[in-house]
Image (cartoon, rainbow, N blue to C red):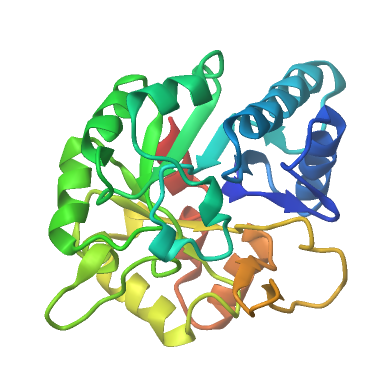
Amino acid sequence: MKIIDIHTHGMGGYDTRTAAAEDILKMAEIHGRHGVSEIIPTVYPAAIEVMRENMAAIRGAMERQKVEGECAVIAGINLEGPFLNPLKCGALDAGAFLEAEEYNLERLIEGFEDIIRIMTIAPEIKGAEGLIRKISGTGIIVSMGHSDATYAEAERGFHSGARGITHIFNAMSGIHHREPGIAGFGLLNKDIYIEVIADPFHLHAKTIELVFKVKNPERIIIVSDSVKQTRTSSKYQGITVGDGSLLGGCMTVIESSERLAGMGIDERAVMRCITENPERYLY
């Protein structure tokens, strides 16, 4: 059974903010030691030349891994941005966000199209719908996130080709009784996939319960959203930046799944969220 984490920035002192393939291989090794079979290293928004440097490190790790056989397979690149809404930047650098223009996209992805698997875009920003169509046409999965979208704007993003929603409820417009927003769209649309960070800090236990009661269970994907500081100690604690904003997840996908099963959520359904569901999403 293949266990897949489609959204991980780092682990155990290493992350994707690097030009060194060795750092990415160390990430894969640590994930593998925790039982994860496959990862999609996730690149932070930054200047285009920096993001390309990070992507080159991931490509180098993928090429070396074919020879060295590290633990978790590096299955491509996830780009969290840079076409995001500054109003919902979370812990990301809003100064690195770019306008959703085809010129910016081409500068970013040229030469990496074959290994970029997922890209997060805010569907409501100017030019996003056209860019979603363009990206989807290349075979890259578009996930909507870091977004202040209304339900209707999220729906238009979906009809433009988006297939997922990045860490639902986090860094996005929530559900209001007069405007269900992008989170409401993610729960109610039966076809779109949603990422769930299932550590003790990103979502209230009852919110997670709501997700599993309302959402099509075949479209839920548990992700770690792990960062450099994840698993650098034996304690599970919220990983935050200076203003208290959550920086990333503190658990591997297996640890999160065990937590959910312990909360009473059906264990078979939870396991599909880290095995069958992400595999169907990617392949």
Quadrant (top left/top right/bottom left/bottom right) for the N terminus? top right
Image side of residue 98 versus residue 66, left or right: left
Above/below status of 129 relative to 254:
above
Above/below status of 256 relative to 2:
below
Q: Give the x, y percent position of residue 111.
A: 55, 13
Which residue is located at x 54 percent, y 75 percent?
Answer: 202
Image side of residue 220 versus residue 2, left or right: left
For the view shown, which residue lies furthest in the top direction?
Answer: 111
Above/below status of 9 relative to 180:
above
Which residue is located at x 44 percent, y 20 percent?
Answer: 106
Inspect this view and state whether residue 35 appears. no
Q: Give the x, y percent position of residue 194.
A: 37, 56
Q: In the rendered image, which quarter is residue 221 located in? A: bottom left
Quadrant (top left/top right/bottom left/bottom right) for the C terminus? top left
Count of numbered badges drawn on the protein = 0
Q: In the rendered image, which quarter is residue 210 located in? A: bottom left
Q: Give the x, y percent position of residue 102.
A: 34, 24
Q: Give the x, y percent position of residue 231.
A: 81, 63
Above/below status of 251 relative to 213:
above
Image side of residue 207 versus residue 59, left or right: left
Which residue is located at x 60 percent, y 37 percent?
Answer: 47
Image side of residue 76 versus residue 241, left or right: left
Which residue is located at x 42 percent, y 26 percent?
Answer: 105
Inspect this view and state whether residue 88 appears. yes
Q: In the rendered image, which quarter is residue 128 located in? A: top left
